[in-house]
Amino acid sequence: MTTTPQSWTVRHFSQANPAGPGCDSMPALLRRLADSIEEFGPVEVQDVVFSWEMTEHGPWRSGTVYFHGPEDD
């Protein structure tokens, strides 16, 4: 039987759409986050948190991805 660690470190990064027109595009943000995840290689995503801030162009969307890779075990 394996034991659950008492604590661990998880890595993270945040990204947002560019400011201005189009900053409210959720599909664009999801593509941006997916491209960045692929650049890290084989990682296990633990969570994705989305945020937004209201601007004159609509909600300026951002996302934070929490993950760990094989070298983190």
Image (cartoon, rainbow, N blue to C red):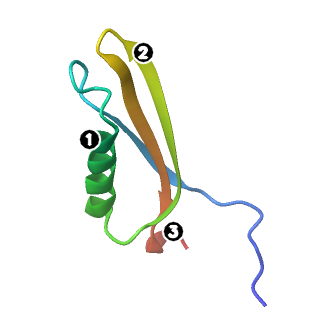
The structure residue drawn at horizontal position 22% and vertical position 18%, both measured from the top left corner, is 20
Say which quarter of the image contains residue 27. Answer: top left
Which amino acid, mark 3? Asp
Instruction: Name the mark nearer the viewer: 2 or 3.
Output: 2
Return the residue at label 1.
28
Mark 2 or mark 3, earlier in chain? 2
Pointer 1 local density, CA inside 10 Å: few below 14, some 14–19, many at least 20: some
Residue 33, image x, y percentages: 33, 49
Residue 59, image quadrant: top left
Kind of residue indicated by mark 1: Ala
Circle 2 sits on which residue? 54
Residue furthest toward the left? Answer: 21
Residue shown at the point (77%, 64%) measured from the top left: 6
Q: In which quarter of the image is residue 71?
A: bottom left
Q: Is disc 1 placed on a helix, strand or loop?
A: helix
- In the drawing, what numbered circle is on residue 72? 3
- What type is the residue that disc 2 sits on? Met
Distance from label 1 to label 2 (Cα)?
Answer: 17 Å
What residue occupies the far bottom of the structure in this picture?
1
Q: Foreground: 44 or 54?
A: 54
Q: Quadrant of the C terminus?
A: bottom right
The residues bearing labels 2 and 3 have C-alpha atoms spaced at a distance of 36 Å
Q: Distance between the residues labelled 3 and 1?
A: 29 Å
Left or right: residue 10 versus residue 39 is right
